[in-house]
Image (spheres, rainbow, N blue to C red):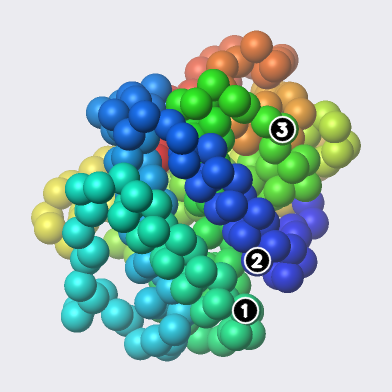
């Protein structure tokens, strides 16, 4: 599938951040966030503000890794100060990204060390947490189909399928197609097994895993279909499976579910 143009990601960061802030402005700060167990509306507001604060620093100081001397902001106790912190962080992030070339070298925790990674990741970070905010307030609105379709790819490729440098992936001859019905496009994954020893000495072996791959020849073993918005929300555990349709080999799908049931925030 074709990913979005990089100027579009910045537009989405701004738009989704504005909506996120708008929704949480009048929400009772102690309101539980059902999609993020243990969080309140205030916690959600601070989380996205802190994420945007950090990535604004990353982009502004590119290509230096800022993590060694980065000072974590403290969560303001007063909700009006928390809203102001979010505004400042969001403005700084948008400004830093607007002044950067997507091809610029930039630190990231992924294999992609360019500003492009920050642009795409932060667009989806804002989108999913906008959805969290709306579900908390009981005011859900539609997800942009193009951004949500891109989110299906990003979620499967990065949040579930990213490979740490100390790990290895042994592929199995099983493929699952995630068919995005409203845009007539698909994201394919190949199932496999993850193994490796982490830097802190934890040994992992035989864990179900998946990787995004180009569409292979032939049919998928299982097909998961739905609109871009339904699939993106479902993959992020922000929506139920009422709009998701499963066909094909039930055992292959069940193995994929072992990976997709892992929590992501």
- Side of 100 relative to 220 (left or right): left
For residue 30, the mark is none
Pointer 3 or 2: first along the chain: 2
The residue where tag 3 is placed is 142
Q: Is residue 162 depicted above or below 64 in this figure?
A: above
Q: Residue 177 in the image: x percent, y percent?
A: 70, 33
Q: Residue 61's quadrant in the figure?
A: bottom left
Q: Residue 142's quadrant in the figure?
A: top right
The residue where tag 1 is placed is 98
The residue where tag 2 is placed is 10
Which residue ends up furthest to the left in the rendered image?
201
Q: Identify the residue at horizontal 62%, vertical 27% (top origin).
A: 140
Mark yes or no: residue 109 visible: no
Labels 2 and 1 touching (C-beta < 8 A):
yes
Mark 3 burial class by Cα count in 10 Å: few <14, some 14-19, many 20+: few
Q: Residue 203 in the image: x percent, y percent?
A: 18, 47
Determine the secondary structure under disc 3: loop
- Side of 106 relative to 103 (left or right): left
Q: Identify the residue at horizontal 77%, vertical 40% (top origin).
A: 145
C-alpha separation, residue under disc 2 versus residue under disc 1: 7 Å
- Side of 259 relative to 95 (left or right): left
Determine the secondary structure under disc 1: helix
C-alpha separation, residue under disc 3 versus residue under disc 2: 19 Å
Which sits in the foreground, 99 or 207? 99
């Amino acid at each position: 599938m074709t990913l979005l143009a990089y100027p579009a990601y910045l537009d989405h960061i701004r738009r989704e951040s504005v909506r996120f802030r708008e929704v949480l402005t009048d929400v009772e700060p102690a309101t539980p966030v059902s999609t993020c167990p243990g969080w309140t509306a205030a916690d959600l507001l601070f989380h996205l503000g802190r994420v945007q604060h950090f990535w604004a620093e990353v982009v502004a100081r590119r290509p230096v890794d800022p993590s060694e001397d980065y000072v974590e902001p403290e969560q303001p106790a007063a909700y009006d100060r928390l809203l102001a912190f979010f505004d400042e962080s969001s403005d700084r992030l948008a400004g830093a990204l607007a002044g950067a070339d997507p091809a610029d070298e930039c630190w990231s925790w992924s294999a992609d060390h360019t500003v492009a990674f920050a642009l795409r990741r932060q667009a989806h970070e804002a989108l999913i947490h906008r959805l969290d905010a709306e579900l908390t307030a009981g005011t859900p609105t539609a997800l942009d189909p193009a951004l949500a379709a891109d989110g299906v790819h990003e979620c499967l490729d990065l949040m579930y399928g990213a490979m740490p440098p100390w790990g290895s992936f042994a592929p199995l001859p099983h493929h699952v197609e995630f068919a995005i019905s409203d845009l007539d496009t698909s994201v394919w994954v190949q199932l496999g097994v993850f193994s490796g020893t982490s830097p802190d000495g934890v040994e992992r072996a035989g864990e179900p895993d998946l990787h995004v791959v180009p569409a292979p020849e032939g049919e998928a073993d299982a097909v998961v279909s739905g609109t871009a918005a339904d699939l993106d929300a479902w993959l992020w555990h922000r929506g139920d499976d009422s709009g998701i349709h499963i066909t094909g080999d039930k055992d292959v799908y069940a193995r994929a579910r072992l990976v997709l049931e892992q929590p992501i925030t």
